[in-house]
Image (cartoon, coloured by chain):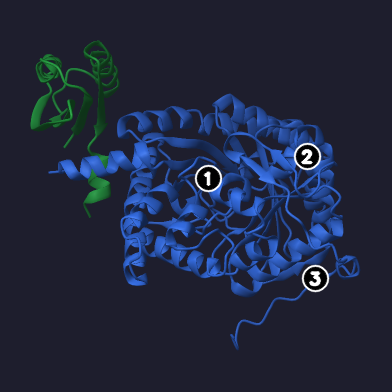
Amino acid sequence: MNNGIITVIGKDKVGIIAKVCNYLSEAEINILDISQTIVNGYFNMMMIVDLEKSTKKFDEIYDGLEKLGESIGVVIKIQHESIFDSMHRI
Amino acid sequence: MISKREILETNRMISDENLDVRTITMGISLLDCADADIDKFNEKVYNKITTKARDLVKVGEELERELGIPIVNKRISVTPIAIAAAGCNTDSYVSVAKTLDRAAKEVGVNFIGGFSALVHKGCTKSDMTLINSIPEALAVTDVVCSSVNIGTSRNGLDMDAVKKMGEIIKETAEMSKDNNCMGCAKLVVFCNAVEDNPFMAGAFHGVGEKDCVINVGVSGPGVVKKALEEVRGADFETLCETIKKTAFKITRVGQLVAQEASKRLGVPFGIIDLSLAPTPAIGDSIAEIFQEMGLEQAGAPGTTAALALLNDNVKKGGVMASSYVGGLSGAFIPVSEDNGMIEAASMGALTLEKLEAMTCVCSVGLDMIAIPGDTSAETISGIIADEAAIGMVNNKTTAVRLIPVIGKGVGETVEFGGLLGYAPIMPVNNYSCADFIRRGGRVPAPIHSFKN
């Protein structure tokens, strides 16, 4: 299993999900779970994605998402799922 | 699948509560570098360290990125130089310290430990050479750390070494007085030193260890404090359970980092050190945990009990989270590195004597304490002897890292910068112990029965 957790935080606007999903689909990254809320105008999204078949390396995805975030005006982060698994699962 | 709440909780610990992995420390044996020619020895040491640790910083940074958690320090510990260099025909190991400094800088680590000697039952010629080299070695290098073990529960205390180390600490302060006596911040005197400690300044790679291992030190006072805020006013059962659960989570991250680092570097995993290491950052303080528990300031009556239960529960939670626990696994209370401790010491709530009492339960020692520059060598030896006696009798590690700040007195402060922080100069009991220290010889091993 090679899952990543993507979190997106920032001021809400049209097309955030579309742009992130577009980036992921171009890199052959499958979305396993997605949840999104808006609190006081702030956009908050979390995705669990499958990196197994990704055409890009983790480092590239990390930089790519960071740049994409800057262009949209939100903060996008990807972390390996193992840190959450370690902390919350025995 | 991981839930949204769990993702939020982990990321909040990292972004708001200063959760980090304090150090990945690579232990490297230098036993196979032995050579009668000191230049050849230095060359072998340099080559071995720069080969083994070549990718240490790179792998650390990779893991930081992938897991999204800061790994604050990447460090190296080596075989005590007094053992590794014993075969060299030389009367000074300063060149070895310089070699360690150069190798550490080449691979990009921020400290290298192991300019050390184990003299708990007496000194060899090599031990004496090392100890005599300490003041200059720490003055002419930047990242080399030194430690000397002067006693164990099995062997008692080497009081000649205790006396000597008081003098060495003074000399080290004198030689680095233009740099805030920084040499002393890199020098620890131990009783019951451990062979797999990843934390500086006391890390060295013991002779019972493999050729190369990865040890990891976790952190997280801020996370514990935040968790305790949620149960404010609750009874001790709830308090202890909360610490245990939090420690488990913190340690699991350390375990993951250790395993991954070990896999990627092709170096076996040694241990996780379960210590709540503070930093000078606000919200990353042991003293603030005491305040959250209900003490007005660190040092108030109840502090020793608070520390005992804190550390016991950190261990109970942490032990289950890691496959191998080792190192010091105690609470660090480095006064200069903990914002709440600095405050408590500055206002007089926390005294040297109370800090000493705290070391009886689980504090690792009198750590990063600035004392007046005119404190005598014998008084420093007396403080070392007291700490070592606590360690010896209680079968625990105790350490002393004192900084006699040359030219400064009580009420003034000294600034070390970075993770080492700043410290108010604390008063020392100045009634003389000179005749006691001057006796010399050894204190026999204590009896380990009839406990009371």
**Residue B184 spot, x, y in % from top left:** 73, 44
Residue B168 shows in this picture: yes
Q: Give the answer, above or below, for where B103 lies relative to B239.
A: above
Measured Cα–Cα span from mark 2 to mark 1: 22 Å
Side of B270 where A70 appears, left or right? left
- Could you say which quadrant of the image residue A1 lies in? top left
Mark 3 touches mark 2? (CB < 8 Å): no
- Which image quadrant: the C terminus of chain B? bottom right
Measured Cα–Cα span from mark 3 to mark 2: 26 Å
Mark 1 is surrounded, within 10 Å at the Cα level, by few (under 14), some (14 to 19) or many (20 or more) other residues, namely: some
What colour do you see for chain A? green
Q: Amino acid at mark 2?
A: Tyr
Q: Which residue is denoted by mark 1 in the rendering? A: B211
SS state under label 3? strand
Q: Which mark is residue B93?
A: 2
- Could you say which quadrant of the image residue B356 lies in? bottom right
What colour do you see for chain B? blue
**Residue B107 spot, x, y in % from top left:** 55, 27
Q: Chain of mark 1?
A: B
Q: Amino acid at mark 1?
A: Asp
At horizontal 69% and vertical 60% (from top left) the residue drawn is: B352
